[in-house]
Image (cartoon, helix red, strand yellow):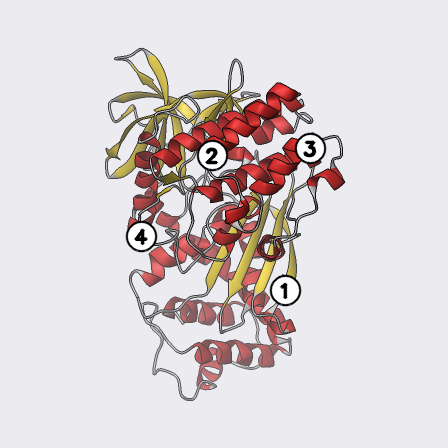
Amino acid sequence: MYGLIFFYIQKFAESAPHGTMSWSSIRSSVATGAARYLPSGSYPDADAVRLLTSIAESTGHPLPEVLKRFGRFLAPHLIKVAGKHVDPGWRTLDLIEHTESIIHAMIRTSNPGAQPPVLEAVRPAPDELHLVYSSQRQLCPLALGLMHGVAEQYHERIEVEEPSCMHRGDPFCSFVIRCIPNDTHAAGSTLADTADVRPGREPPPVSSLEGDSMPPSIGGYAVVRLLGQGGMGRVYLGRDERLNRDVAIKVLHPSKARDSTATRRFLREGRAAAAVEHPHVMAIYQVGEERGLPYIVMQRLVGRTLKQARQSGPLPLRELLRIARETADGLAAAHRQGLVHRDIKPDNIFLQDPDAQVRIIDFGLARAGNEEGGDVTVDGAVVGTPAYMSPERVEGRSLDAKSDLFGLGVILYEQLADRLPFEGNSLVSMLASISRGAPPDLRSIAPHVPDALARLVMRLIAHDRADRPADAQAVVAELASIERAV
C-alpha cells in the first residue's frame, strides 16, 4: 500500500482519543512491518490493516466503522494532495468518477509496483454515478467513507446503495451514488458540450487553460466565453475572424493532459472526426496544442441533443424516422472511412437549429477499424455508456461497424417503447442484461409501432452481430422505405 496512507493513518490516530493506546503502541502492534513509513514508499497491505485494526480495538468500535471514519478523515487531505489533478470545476460525483485516473497519475506512473484498487465508473445521469470497486484488500467501508468525505468537502449530500459487496461473498463491490439536490450550488455543465443548448443560460465566469483567467485566444481563434465544462476539460465559444464564423474549441484539462493516454485519446477524437466530411457529422476544423494543452476546433452547433428533445415528450414517428435515417447516413460515412464511433447514444445525436438536422458528435471513443488494441483505459475500466453498449463491447470482443448499429437500435427501441431493451439498477446488472441478450420483443411493448420498423429495431439489437443489418447504408435504405409507408 502507498506510504502516504500510512502517514494519514498516524494523523488519524492522533486526531482523536483512542483509549489508552498511543501512536507508538499502535505502531508497535505491527511487529513485522517496516522500521518506519515514508510517504513516498510502498508497504505491505497487512501493515495498514493491522494499524487500523489496532485503532478499532483501542476504541472498542468495529473495524468497518473505523474504516469509514478514516475514509471521511482522509478525503479532504487526499483532495489537497491531488490538487493539480483535480479540476476546480468538479463537484462530488465528478471527483469520484475520475478517481481512477487520478490514482494512475499520482501513484502508478511514479511507482509502477504499487497496486491501488481498480475503480470502474459510469455516469448514467448528472446526479448519479455507478462504481465498481475491486481490490484484494476488500476495504470497501474505507471507500464508502471516502465518498462521504468528498461530499462533505464539497458541501453536498449523497446517498449510496451497495448492490454487491465482497464481504457478502460477491466477487466485487458495486455502488450506486446519487447526489441529493440542495440550493448551495448550481449544477455544472457537461461537455456535449460543443454547443449552446436550449434553454440557453449564461455560464459563470471561467478560468483559463491553467485555471487563472480566460485565454484571449486558442490556436489563432479569439475566445469569447465558456460554453461548457466537465471532467475532461472545457469548451469555449471562439471566433474565426478570417471566415467570419463562430466555432467551438474543446480544450483538455491540464490534469488530463499530463496523462499521455488521455492526451492520445483526446487527439484521436479530433483526427477521427476530421476524417469524416458529411452533413450529419460535426465538422472538425483544426487539431493542435496551446501551451502544452491539446485542443480541437470544431463546428459550433446550436440546438439540443436527442436526449434533451425526448424530455419534452415522445417524438412524432416521422420525425424519429428522419433522425434515425440521418444518423445511419452519418455512420455510413464514418464506416466508409474505417471508423467505428463506439458510443452512439442520444447524448451524441445533436439536432441542429433551425430544422433539427442530425449532427453526430463526440468521436472520443472512435477507433480506426484496423487499429490494434482495445479501449484506451486504465486497468480495463469500462469506457462509454453501458445502456447502449453492444454485447461484443461488454464481453471485450473485437468491434466493427455493427456495434454502432446496435447503439442506433437501442436508441430507436427506447424512443418507441419508452424504456430500454436492456435494463438494470446498477452498472453490473445493466451489463449482465446486455450480455444475456434477451430483450422483450418491441411489438409486445409498443404494438402501435409499424411491423417493418419493429422488425428492423429487433435486428439492430440482435445479440449475434451476424443477425444485424449488413451495414449502415442498408439501414438508411430500410428507414427511407418505412418513412414512405407511414
Q: Which residue is mark 3?
A: 451
SS for dot 3: helix
Asked if labels 4 and 3 touch by Cβ distance under 8 angstroms, the answer is: no
Q: Nearer the viewer, residue 449 or 149?
A: 449
Asked if labels 1 and 4 touch by Cβ distance under 8 angstroms, the answer is: no
Nearer to us: label 2 or label 4: 2
Spatial CA span between label 2 and label 1: 39 Å
Check residue 372 in the rendering and tell me which mark sits there, or answer none: 4
Asked if labels 4 and 2 touch by Cβ distance under 8 angstroms, the answer is: no
Disc nearer the start of the sequence (4/1)? 1
Q: Nearer the viewer, residue 2 or 370?
A: 370
What kind of residue is marked 3?
Answer: Asp
Mark 3 crowdedness (10 Å alpha carbons): few <14, some 14-19, many ≥20: few
Disc nearer the start of the sequence (2/1)? 1
Where residue 8 appears, as percent x and y from the top left, is: 44, 67
SS for dot 4: loop
Q: Which residue is mark 1?
A: 164
Residue 305 seen anywhere in this rendered image of the structure: no
